[in-house]
Image (spheres, helix red, strand yellow):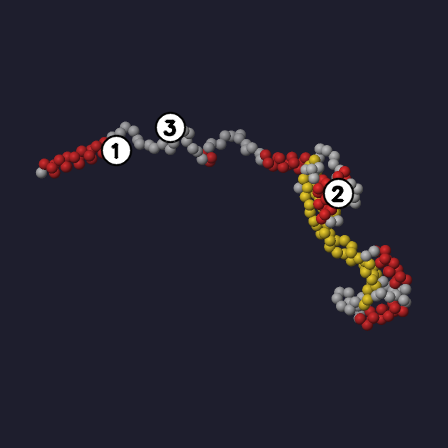
Amino acid sequence: MFLRLLFVLLSALNIAVGAWLLLGQPYRHVGYATDPGVAQLQLLSEVPVTEGTIAAPDASADAATGTAQDYRCVALGPFDTPQDLRSARQALDGHVARMRSRQQQTTQPSAWWVYLPAVASRAQALQEARQLAAKNINDYFVVGSGDQANTVSLGLFRDPANARKRLDQVTAAGFPARMSERSESVPEYWLDLAVASARPFDWREYLGASDLGSHDIPCF
């Protein structure tokens, strides 16, 4: 009986002490996010904006503009072969701010063709060929198919002067000969240079006499 009473009294005492510790303190238990003396972290969005503050301009954009204004760029060429282009790069190395090589396709004359225009049938084309032979005009060919079918070819010439001579020979004999230019796509090799605007620059000083040309281009 005595032990049961003692247990009840101890339980009541523990409850009373706990209630006093929880409710009877004169201050609140508040945790601190940082140690004493250390500034509290703030999100950038929580920082108040001061009126009149302007973001600093992008320095890299100004630098790029300045670079474009300090240089001028020219295209040099066309070079006949990639080896000629490499040799020019070696000769100009160290004398320009920067260089780049490029290749582009261009169309140029490959030959000149002398011919009699196509007629309505192959029989008519063969008749024209016999008439050419009767006038001692040889070295012709009757085209039998394709876009130029029933045309009488009178020769393909690399030299336009020779083509013109053949044309005159055939027209003088009374035939309606014509001459047309044949073209082909070929590569061209160019060297682009960026040079300082503050000083004169003549690429001929380093490459010597040549038939190369140059023209201004947007800087790269």
Depth check, mark 3 against mark 1: the one in front is 3
Could you say whether the residue bearing mark 2 is in a helix, strand or loop? Answer: strand
Residue at 26% x, 29% y is 25
Quadrant where the N terminus is found in the figure: top left
Front residue of 206/134: it is: 206
Q: Is residue 118 visible?
A: no
- Looking at this view, name the residue that lies furthest to the bottom: 123
The location of residue 203, given as percent across then percent down, is 75, 39
Residue at 82% x, 69% y is 125
Relative to 205, is 82 above or below? Answer: below
The location of residue 3, given as percent across then percent down, is 11, 37
Distance of mark 3 from mark 1, alpha carbons? 25 Å
Distance of mark 3 from mark 2, alpha carbons? 73 Å
Depth check, mark 1 against mark 2: the one in front is 2
Residue at mark 1:
22
Residue at mark 2:
214
Give me the disc on residue 151: none
Relative to 25, is 121 above or below? Answer: below
Q: Residues within 10 Å of mark 2 (few under 14, many from 20)?
A: some
Q: Classify residue 81 as left or right of residue 133.
A: left
In primary-sequence order, the first of circles 3 and 2 is 3
Relative to 25, is 209 above or below? Answer: below
Circle 3/circle 2 CB separation < 8 Å? no
Give me the disc on residue 36: 3
Circle 3/circle 1 CB separation < 8 Å? no
Could you say whether the residue bearing mark 3 is in a helix, strand or loop? Answer: loop
Residue at 80% x, 71% y is 122
Relative to 145, is 93 above or below? Answer: above
